[in-house]
Image: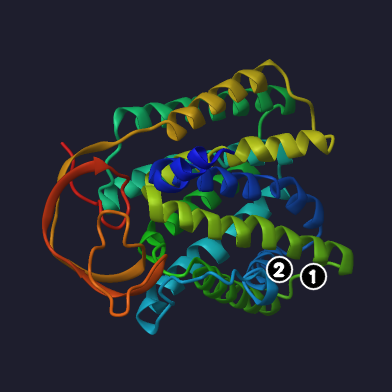
């Protein structure tokens, strides 16, 4: 990567956010067939508890970044964190593990495409995020790729079975999680992952013990912890960082690449082989990601006066308040924005949640 390319990536919020969302999708999607493998014979709540224990462990000790300068999680955020943990770390993973035990890994991976559709709709309905023509086209293209994959998998496996409904419910739970977590994305991603995962694991452990669900032996137990650290810890942190830059709808749309990554992982483990449907879907996924990575959005817009706290720099065109002594680089503290009108390239981040016609 050249210096100019690296600078372009760091300065372009749409490109940077899309890249982070794509990495989150890869980290999450690759774990789906492994969760099915390690979760055989394990209680659904027990599996969910181990997955989010792994995610919590991934946010502690040497796994935590030393450059975490974002605002911390505070008591005022607890109600939202509890709701997010309940939907995303208890209900959704329990539905997913139950569904994985009743359908093949490839079909389950592909059905995860519904999460993107639910997330985009909820982001529009709750946060009123604007979806331009390019993003709408990308969502349609990626969604069409998911449909092709499901059709191809259904023909090979003669339907996806009752477990498919549980997987779709899991995607609805995660879509609600994604949308409700949007206001948390500007806090420390490491702390949000830690608290969400810890709360979710605690709820699931209590449910597993109360219903006397079986836990795995040491080897599959370690496997589920590793899946949780990667697919639910690292992935969630990347997802939150992407949401911070490009909003819930765009992040959810790009994240729909995760099912294709899961399908590739399942195929590599011997669960079928890619055919013409998969190749056509791969082209559509690549086209959809390209549309996101090359999106440009800029127009004249007005910022209202605002007082808030988040990580920021003083060379981004929005933070020109003074420090004594001066501060260089990213830092976080409560600060005030005066009302202003200007024009530049931007994404639906914390400062750009204005209406679009």
Within 10 Å of disc 1 (Cα), the crowding (few <14, some 14-19, many 20+) is many
Looking at the image, the residue that sits furthest to the bottom is 75
> Disc 1 vs disc 2: which is toward the camera?
2
Q: In this view, does 62 lie to the left or right of 292?
A: right
Q: Is residue 268 left or right of residue 175?
A: right
Q: Distance between the residues labelled 1 and 2?
A: 9 Å
Q: What residue sits 46% from the left and 34% below the top?
A: 293
Confirm whether residue 173 shows in the render: no
Residue 274, percent from left and from top: 74, 24
**Mark 1 vs 2: CB contact within 8 A:** yes
Q: Which of marks 1 and 2 is nearer the N terminus?
A: 2
Q: What element carries label 1?
A: loop
Looking at this view, is 172 or 30 the one in front? Answer: 30
* Residue 50, numbered circle: 2
Image quarter where the C terminus lies is top left
Q: Is mark 2 on a helix, strand or loop?
A: helix
Give the answer, above or below, for where 156 lies relative to 293: above
Q: What residue sits 61% from the left and 18% below the top?
A: 280
Looking at this view, is 349 or 125 the one in front? Answer: 349
Residue 273, percent from left and from top: 78, 26
Image quarter where the N terminus lies is top right
Give the answer, above or below, for where 170 lies relative to 116: below
Confirm whether residue 171 shows in the render: yes
* Quadrant of the image occupied by residue 2: top right
Q: Is residue 342 left or right of residue 84?
A: left
Give the answer, above or below, for where 208 lies relative to 220: below
Within 10 Å of disc 2 (Cα), the crowding (few <14, some 14-19, many 20+) is many
Looking at the picture, the colour scheme in use is rainbow
* Quadrant of the image occupied by residue 105: top right
Residue 61, percent from left and from top: 67, 77
Residue at label 1?
A: 215
């Amino acid at each position: 990567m050249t210096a100019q390319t690296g600078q372009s990536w760091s300065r372009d919020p749409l490109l940077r956010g899309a890249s982070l969302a794509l990495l989150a999708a890869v980290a999450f999607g690759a774990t789906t067939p492994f969760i099915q493998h390690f979760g055989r014979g394990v209680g659904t709540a027990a599996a969910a508890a181990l997955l989010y224990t792994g995610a919590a462990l991934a946010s502690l000790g040497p796994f935590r970044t030393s450059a975490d300068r974002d605002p911390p999680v505070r008591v005022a955020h607890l109600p939202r964190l509890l709701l997010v943990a309940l939907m995303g770390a208890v209900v959704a993973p329990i539905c997913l593990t139950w569904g994985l035990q009743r359908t093949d890994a490839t079909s389950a991976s592909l059905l995860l495409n519904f999460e993107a559709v639910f997330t985009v709709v909820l982001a529009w309905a709750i946060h009123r995020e604007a979806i331009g023509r390019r993003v709408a086209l990308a969502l349609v293209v990626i969604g069409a790729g998911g449909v092709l994959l499901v059709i191809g998998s259904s023909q090979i496996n003669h339907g996806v079975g009752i477990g498919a409904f549980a997987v779709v419910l899991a995607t609805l739970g995660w879509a609600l999680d994604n949308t409700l977590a949007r206001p948390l994305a500007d806090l420390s991603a490491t702390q949000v992952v830690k608290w969400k995962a810890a709360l979710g694991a605690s709820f699931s452990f209590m449910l597993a013990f109360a219903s006397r669900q079986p836990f795995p032996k040491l080897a599959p137990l370690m496997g589920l912890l590793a899946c949780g650290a990667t697919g639910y810890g690292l992935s969630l942190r990347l997802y939150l960082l992407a949401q911070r830059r490009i909003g819930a709808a765009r992040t959810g749309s790009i994240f729909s690449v995760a099912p294709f990554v899961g399908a590739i992982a399942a195929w590599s483990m011997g669960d079928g082989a890619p055919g013409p449907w998969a190749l056509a879907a791969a082209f559509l996924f690549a086209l959809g990601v390209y549309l996101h990575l090359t999106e440009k959005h800029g127009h004249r817009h007005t910022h209202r006066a605002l007082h808030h706290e988040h990580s920021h720099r003083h060379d981004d065109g929005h933070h020109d308040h003074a420090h004594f002594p001066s501060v260089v680089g990213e830092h976080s503290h409560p600060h005030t924005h005066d009302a202003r009108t200007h024009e530049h390239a931007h994404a639906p981040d914390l400062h750009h949640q204005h209406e679009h016609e």
